[in-house]
Image: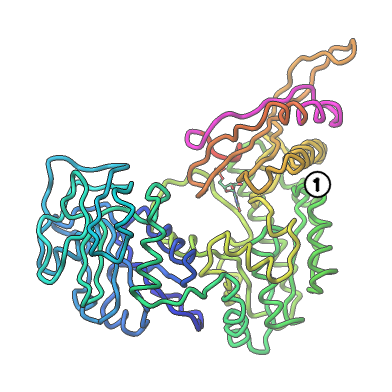
């Protein structure tokens, strides 16, 4: 259901039938400057009425509409007079539920195919002739419902688009939301702006005023605390809450000793000096190093860091009287995914957002309707510096999961120096915003080398740089050789006790992004 934040904007509901692409549809709608939210296909027509969306999009889905147990839509929704666009499964479902037929074809259609459009449709420009679209289906609409017209076909889909202008119902068998359908965004814009009458006025910044009003109403005259990790999500959440309740927000920054070079200074500088936010800076490095002494197992390390973090945070927050609210930088993908995916645990992630519920605070989550890139834009509009807004993701356990084997202050210092060189050179090459992450790893091995005329026996540094859209998969970045060489020679010359540099060319899967 809608997350219920006050919104003065028109809303587009993306009804999810289990699609891989529901989030992508929601993003594309927002790129068309109309606010969108994803809801489950179990939504009732009364609930839709209450939300009063300006338009509805039915997503694709993995099932066949013809099998028992296939997700259906409350048919009353078609009668509410709200413009609807069905995509793939959504198109077939609309056809089936309104009296058409869907059958299994001999041949499915997967990937790029050519679409022939009739001049009659307003959804696409028929003048361009044949156009490339992305298909992924084995069922086909074989009979259009009464009152509908087929307006496009492909070699294996006689009905690739259909519409009922009077009822403002539209459907496409292909996927307009993916980049492989070049005219896809135009189709969505035509549907949203021309056919559904949505105004293209929404921007991520539009949420700022509504969020401030909602936070003010929620927190009233009480106090809120926010754990800062130095990352963009908690930073933007804190900046928003600070705009709403001013000095009644206190931020807590736990310095675990496992942060990157310069990170703690930057957090203090940004929040205390520039934003004027009250900040409790807890120096807890000694406790973390003591807790980690002698520990080499990755999961045990993560557990120790996570638990210590909570304990230190509790101690710091316990001193703040009247603090009833905890600010979290939860994002929209976390909201959508929580509870749905039953994926196997690969690593036990720990971050500031992972503080346990029994800390006995009510949650304030001002970013729960935003995607990551939208959060960055809000952060910029709130005046946060680029170094915070464009910061790469950094794991909650920090450098602790980039040091293989026991974590010691010396190893952290070595890794901080090497990591800084990697980041400096990536920035100098102008690749900072292109890469998902780029960092250094310190493995627990030594190798023989020669420097000057001396034999060396020292640790290597491994450079890891990846591209990713969604973190679930990632590819190793094809960094220029010259850049790799520059990083390698600087690391060996400037970082003590390193005599070799390797580049990690493993994608995810089979590797993960971090080494532990
Ligand atoms: P992996 O290594 O699982 O990482 O491919 C995926 C993304 O998550 C980040 N990461 C974490 N983030 N707490 C976090 O907040 C964690 O415990 C954690 N472990 C990994 C990692 O940097 C990458 O962006």
Other-residue count near label 1 (Cα within 10 Å), few / some / many at <14 / 14–19 / ≥20: some
Tag 1 residue: 261
Which quarter of the picture shows residue 374? Answer: bottom right
Q: Which residues are magenta?
A: 487-510
- How far across and down, in percent of the image, does residue 288 sit? 74, 50
Residue at the outermost top position: 453
Ligand 1 has an atom within 8 Å of the beta carbon of the residue at disc 1: no
- How far across and down, in percent of the image, does residue 277 sit? 78, 73
SS label for mark 1: loop
* Residue nearer the viewer, 203 or 371: 203
Q: Is 466 a magenta residue?
A: no
Which quarter of the figure is the N terminus placed in? Answer: bottom left
Measured along the vertical axis of the image, is residue 33 above or below residue 187? below
Measured along the vertical axis of the image, is residue 72 above or below residue 431? below
Q: Is residue 445 left or right of residue 473?
A: right
- How far across and down, in percent of the image, does residue 177 sit? 39, 56
- Residue displayed at 50% across by 81% down: 7
- Residue displayed at 63% across by 62% down: 376
Measured along the vertical axis of the image, is residue 348 above or below residue 331? above
Which quarter of the picture shows residue 40? Answer: bottom left
Q: How many marks?
A: 1
* Residue nearer the viewer, 136 or 358: 136
Q: Is residue 49 left or right of residue 393?
A: left
Q: Is residue 18 left or right of residue 398?
A: left
- Residue displayed at 50% across by 50% down: 470
Q: Is 495 a magenta residue?
A: yes
- How far across and down, in percent of the image, does residue 295 sit? 68, 38
Q: Is residue 52 left or right of residue 417?
A: left
Which quarter of the figure is the C terminus placed in? Answer: top right
Residue at the outermost front position: 127
* Residue nearer the viewer, 77 or 265: 77
């Amino acid at each position: 259901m809608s997350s219920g934040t006050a919104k003065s904007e028109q809303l587009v509901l993306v009804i999810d039938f289990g699609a891989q692409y529901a989030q992508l549809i929601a993003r594309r709608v927002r790129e068309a400057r109309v606010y969108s939210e994803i809801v489950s296909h179990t939504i009732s027509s009364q609930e839709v009425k209450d939300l009063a969306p300006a338009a509805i999009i039915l997503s694709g889905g993995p099932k066949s509409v013809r099998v028992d147990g296939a997700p259906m839509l409350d048919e009353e929704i078609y009668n509410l007079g709200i413009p609807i666009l069905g995509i793939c499964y959504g198109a077939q479902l609309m056809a089936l539920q309104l009296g058409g037929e869907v059958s299994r074809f001999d041949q499915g259609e997967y990937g790029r195919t050519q679409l022939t459009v009739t001049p009659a449709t307003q959804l696409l420009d028929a003048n361009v002739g044949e156009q490339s679209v992305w298909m992924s289906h084995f069922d086909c609409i074989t009979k259009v419902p009464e009152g509908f017209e087929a307006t496009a076909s492909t070699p294996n889909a006689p009905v690739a688009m259909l519409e009922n202008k009077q009822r403002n119902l539209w459907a496409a068998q292909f996927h307009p939301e993916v980049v492989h359908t070049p005219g896809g965004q135009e189709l969505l814009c035509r549907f949203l702006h021309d056919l559904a009458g949505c105004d293209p006025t929404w921007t991520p910044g539009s949420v700022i005023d509504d969020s401030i009003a909602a936070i003010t109403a929620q927190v009233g005259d009480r106090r809120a605390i926010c754990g800062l990790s130095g990352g963009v999500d908690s930073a933007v959440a804190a900046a928003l809450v600070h705009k709403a309740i001013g000095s009644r927000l206190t931020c807590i920054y736990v310095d675990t000793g496992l942060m990157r070079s310069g990170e703690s200074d930057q957090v203090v500088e940004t929040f205390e000096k520039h934003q004027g936010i009250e900040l409790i800076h807890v120096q807890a490095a000694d406790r973390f190093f003591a807790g980690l002494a002698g520990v080499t197992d990755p999961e045990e390390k993560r557990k120790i860091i996570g638990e210590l973090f909570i304990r230190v945070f509790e101690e710091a927050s316990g001193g703040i009287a009247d603090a009833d609210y905890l600010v979290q930088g939860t994002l929209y993908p976390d909201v959508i995914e929580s509870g749905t995916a039953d994926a196997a645990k690969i690593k036990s992630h720990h971050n500031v957002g992972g503080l346990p519920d029994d800390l006995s605070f009510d949650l304030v989550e001002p970013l729960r309707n935003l995607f990551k890139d939208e959060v960055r834009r809000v952060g910029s509009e709130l005046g946060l510096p680029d170094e915070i807004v464009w910061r790469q993701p950094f794991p909650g356990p920090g450098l602790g999961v980039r040091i293989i084997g026991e974590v010691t202050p010396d190893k952290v210092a070595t890794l901080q120096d090497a990591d800084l060189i990697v980041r400096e050179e990536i920035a100098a090459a102008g690749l900072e915003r292109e890469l998902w992450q780029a960092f250094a790893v310190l493995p627990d091995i030594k190798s023989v080398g020669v420097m000057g005329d001396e034999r060396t026996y020292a640790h290597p540094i491994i450079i890891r740089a990846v591209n990713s859209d969604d973190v679930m998969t990632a590819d190793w970045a094809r960094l220029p050789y010259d850049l790799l060489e520059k990083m390698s020679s600087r690391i060996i010359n400037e970082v003590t006790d390193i005599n070799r540099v390797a580049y990690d060319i493993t994608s995810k899967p089979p590797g993960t992004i971090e080494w532990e």
